[in-house]
Structures are given as structure tokens and as C-alpha cells.
Image (cartoon, rainbow, N blue to C red):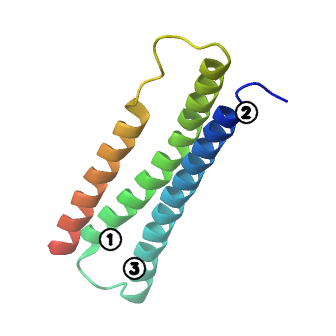
Amino acid sequence: MRANLREHQANERTFLGWMRTCIAIIAFGFVLERFSFLLRSLAPNANPAVPMIRITIVGTGLIWLGTVMIPVSLWRFLAEARNIDKPVETGTGNWPVVLLAVLLTAVGIYMALIVGL
């Protein structure tokens, strides 16, 4: 039996949680981008093209954010697995979680401003 099995399993569950989050962010960005395309198709002569372009930019940005977070989560998983096997005094830090929270908050505020205009 592998030493520290429970810690490794917890690390894998955390990694899978990160993967689900990345997939959800990518899917939400894709839905936003396609919704903007649908609006352009339904009303080709409508003037408010600027909000549709903004939604497309936000959707594309979310797709890129989710894609970039995949290797970050892999790096964090591998670093924590290494720390479980060979404990060190310092951990990997919480910067990926803080970065994701800040970026998603900024996207939420931006989307609220677009809808409110």
C-alpha cells in the first residue's frame, strides 16, 4: 500500500475539481460567444453591435482563461504530490486560486455593466 494514500487521493480530487472548473469556464465562454453570434444572425441590421462585440470578447477571454488554467492546475497537482512524498516547510501558495477569483470577479463586473447599459 502506498504511503500517504489519503493525501494523494485528496490531491487528485482537488485536481479533478480544478479540471471541472476549467471545463465549466471554457463552456461558459463558448456559450457566450455563440450567443453573440446568434444575436447577430437574428438581427443583422440592428445598431447595437458594440455590446455583441464585447460579449464575444468576454466569451473568447473565458475560453482562454479556462485553457490557461489547465496547465496551472497540473503544475499545482504535481507540486503538491511532490510535497506529499517529500515534505518541505513551504507550500506552493494560493496564487492560482486568487488569480482565478480576481479574473472571474472582473468578468462578472464587466458582464453586469454590459447588461446594464
Q: Looking at the image, is 113 positioned above or below residue 1?
A: below
Q: Residue at x 62, y 40 (%)?
A: 10
Using the image, tell me which numbered label, if any, was put on residue 5.
Answer: 2
Using the image, tell me which numbered label, if any, was put on residue 31.
Answer: none
- Pointer 3 residue: 40
Residue 2 percent coordinates (x, y):
80, 27
Camera-nearest residue between 112 and 6: 6
* Quadrant, the N terminus: top right
Check disc 3 and give the amino acid type: Arg
Spatial CA distance of label 3 from label 1 is 8 Å
Residue 19 percent coordinates (x, y):
59, 49
Q: Residues within 10 Å of mark 3 (few under 14, many from 20)?
A: some
Residue 30 percent coordinates (x, y):
51, 65
Circle 2: element type = helix
Q: Looking at the image, is 44 positioned above or below residue 50?
A: below
Check disc 1 and give the amino acid type: Met
Q: Looking at the image, is 17 positioned above or below residue 55?
A: above
- Pointer 1 residue: 52
Spatial CA distance of label 2 from label 3 is 53 Å
Q: Nearer the viewer, mark 2 or mark 3?
A: 2
